[in-house]
Amino acid sequence: MEEKFKPTFYVTTPIYYVNDVPHIGHAYTTIIADALARYQRLSGKKVYFLTGTDEHGQKIEKAAAEKGLKPKELADRVVVRFKELWQKLNISYDYFIRTTEEFHERGVQKIFQQLLAKGDIYKGTYQGWYCVSEENFLPEDVPLEAEGYKICPDCGRKALLLEEESYFFRLSAYQQPLLDFYAAHPRFVRPQSRMNEVVSFVRQGLKDLSITRTSVRWGIPVPGDPKHTIYVWFDALHNYVTGAGYGWNQELFQTFWPADVHLIGKDILRFHAIFWPAFLMAAGLPLPETVFGHGWWLKDETKMSKSRGNVLDPYLILEKVGADALRYFLLREVPIGLDGSFSHEGFVQRVNSDLANDLGNLVQRTLTMAFNYFGGQVPRPGEETGSDRELARSFFETRDRVFSLYDDYALSRALEEIWVFLNVTNKYLADNEPWKLAKKPESRERLARIIYQALCAIRGSSYLLYPVMPETAEKIWTLLGESCQPGEVLKSSLDFYGLAPGARLHQPRALFPRIDLAEFIGEMEKPWARAETAPKTEEKMEYISYEEFKKMDLRVAKVLAAERVPGTSKLLKLQIDLGSEKRQIIAGVAETYSPEELVGKEFIVIANLQPAVIRGIESQGMLLAAEVEGKAIIPFFDRELPPGTKVK
Ligand SMILES: [Zn+2]
């Protein structure tokens, strides 16, 4: 890169909406951001990595009401789930912003007032299609039906054309300034194809943007006009400045703003590439360097969705293979601008061939030889030969290429280069056959050199891998007795010959056990997991007799205790009181109910259902629930009943 060295780096993920629990899409964006942050820290920069949650808006108000919660209470619960997942994935964020935090709300109000004063925000009338059932305006991009009205995409009902008072952002005034900015910064939006998309959209003309609602209560009030709340996008986008100190920590803000890169899914590109820079121009703030729109993960070439029952559960994969294998797979498989397809076969193949074989075996083999031949110390190397110099040269070239690929957000290509070098090292060992030299005392110096070279190659690779696979890098450092603070390893000083002869090594252990494909698929696609999410087919009614119905023993059960089944996102283990006895059941309701809220509740169970073993835990019965969009909704009673009461 030709630009001068910038000593800071600021990376963001979108703030995630709390009406959903974390899934693989959230994990993907956040892993990319983490790899970039770790790389920049490794290269000696001061890094600020911001992620968080978007907590306002009507959808959250409704989702909370359905669970009998306040919106903030719902948000508090979902935030815990995000933070748990980020911890499991080793996400090294510096700050987790929540849009309900006071400093954020004040910052948004301050900018709103400033723009109102200069005329970039004005009061007008919003006309839009309104769903009476949902009590909200439809998104602008819902198409008009042939009959001249719009249909609500959420409930399928006919919407009404309504007007309400609203504040508008004067987006139309920023059409030309935006086009000028894009022309001067052709790499503002990446990948390039998306930049072109944005430019042609803006060229078609921009309408002013309605940025407040009188019909939504759960939002930031407009200063001085509190019957209006600020619409979620104006609120949410400003997290990137408030989260970096705007309005409350001037030093932090001066240090890191403007952001180097906003990572986003391609679905929210327009908000980030058009609205956001226009808001910033209006507020007189510098614009971010890059908006990077990444692709989608498909499952076996189809879009993941709850109704298809093919949503990947990141917790299940993490439990089975650990964070680094998942991080590696997602970042290696496709360049971040393109769509990727996840298949269990592809995943297992990558773990076995790249991680268990190419990397794991190299480390295991080399360390084992260092123990067998040199007592677990870094050997004092004999003289260097041509093939040794060749290996070192190959490392330096790889290092420079990998760093410039990381600089360019080309994570997949960087990993490819590292793997080429690992295989160069594997070939170096195969060509030099140290195991044969070990049998000849006169070749001891040569043997020492070969093991030394291989250890250096492993050490060097570990630093290159660190941004994507921090846990693995740290394991390797432990094996090599390397004490590393990533920030201290300036990229210019990452040497090949960094190991001190005589230093103590540690006993190797397998970094990545091989995965058995059949077993893996079995665990990922448990029959009960499929049954829970399989699309319902409309079948012909099949009648059962009253005698058959009478065979079912339906009872009122009261929950005594509840806990999550570790490693699953859906399952709760419930201890229930059936009056005459206590039992344990496993229920797929964790996406709708927390363990705490079920304790003390009563519902209906089928008491004489044959017991089943689910995830190794016995389930003695089944509770009744409705399924709505993949989520279980339990029918509760309107009064308390004695546990064990018969239902018929
Ligand atoms: Zn509706």
Image (cartoon, rainbow, N blue to C red):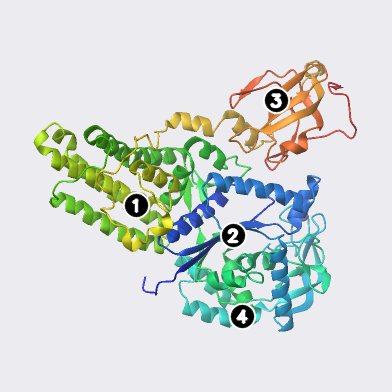
- What amino acid type is highlighted by mark number 1? Glu
Query: Mark 1 falls on what kind of element?
Result: helix
- What amino acid type is highlighted by mark number 3? Ile
* Residue at 70% across, 70% down: 108
- What amino acid type is highlighted by mark number 2? Pro
- What amino acid type is highlighted by mark number 4? Gly
Query: Mark 3 falls on what kind of element?
Result: strand
Which circle's residue, 4 or 1, is located before the other in the chain? 4
Which circle's residue, 2 or 1, is located before the other in the chain? 2
Distance CA(mark 2)–CA(mark 3): 38 Å
Residue designated by label 3: 585
Residue designated by label 4: 284
Question: Residue 66 at x, y = what percent?
Answer: 79, 46
Report whether 99 appears left or right of 43. Answer: right
Which circle's residue, 4 or 3, is located before the other in the chain? 4
Residue designated by label 1: 416
Number of numbered callouts drawn: 4
